[in-house]
Amino acid sequence: MPRVTKHIYESEIKEIIKILNTQLKSIQDLLPKNYIENLDFTYKKLALLENSKVVENNIHEEISELI
C-alpha cells in the first residue's frame, strides 16, 4: 500500500501547486513589470531546486529497491 499512498500524496501536491500557480498569476497581474521579472527568476530557481529534490528522492528509492 505505500505506493498507493505515495500516488495519492503526489496528486494532492500537484493540485495544491496548480492552485498556488493560479493565485500567483493573480498576484502578478497586480504588480509592476520589473517586480514580476524578479519574481519569475526566483520562481524558476525554486522550481529547479524542487526538481533536483525529486530526482534525488527517486535515486534513493531506486537504490533502496536494489538493496
Image (cartoon, rainbow, N blue to C red):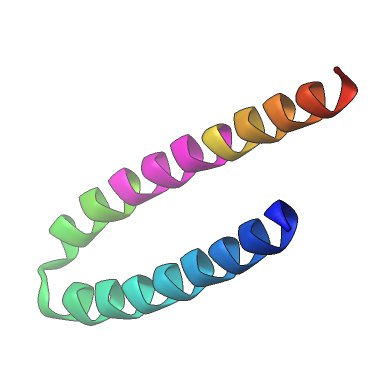
Residue positioned most to the top: 67
Foreground residue, 32 or 39?
39
Residue 52, picture quadrant:
top right
Is the magenta region chiefly helix, strand or loop?
A: helix
- Work out whether 25 lies above or below 3: below
Foreground residue, 18 or 66?
66
Residue 67, image x and y in percent? 85, 17
- Work out whether 36 lies above or below 28: above
Residue 63, image x and y in percent? 79, 21
Determine if the magenta segment contains residue 21.
no
Residue positioned most to the right: 66
Which residues lie in the magenta part?
42-52
Q: Is residue 30 left or right of residue 18?
A: left
Residue 59, image x and y in percent? 72, 27
Q: Residue at horizontal 62%, vertical 28%? A: 56
Residue 51, image x and y in percent? 56, 41
The quadrant in which the N terminus is found is bottom right
Q: Is residue 2 left or right of residue 65?
A: left
Residue 64, picture quadrant:
top right
Q: Residue at horizontal 73%, vertical 55%? A: 3
Residue positioned most to the front: 1
Q: Is residue 1 left or right of residue 12?
A: right
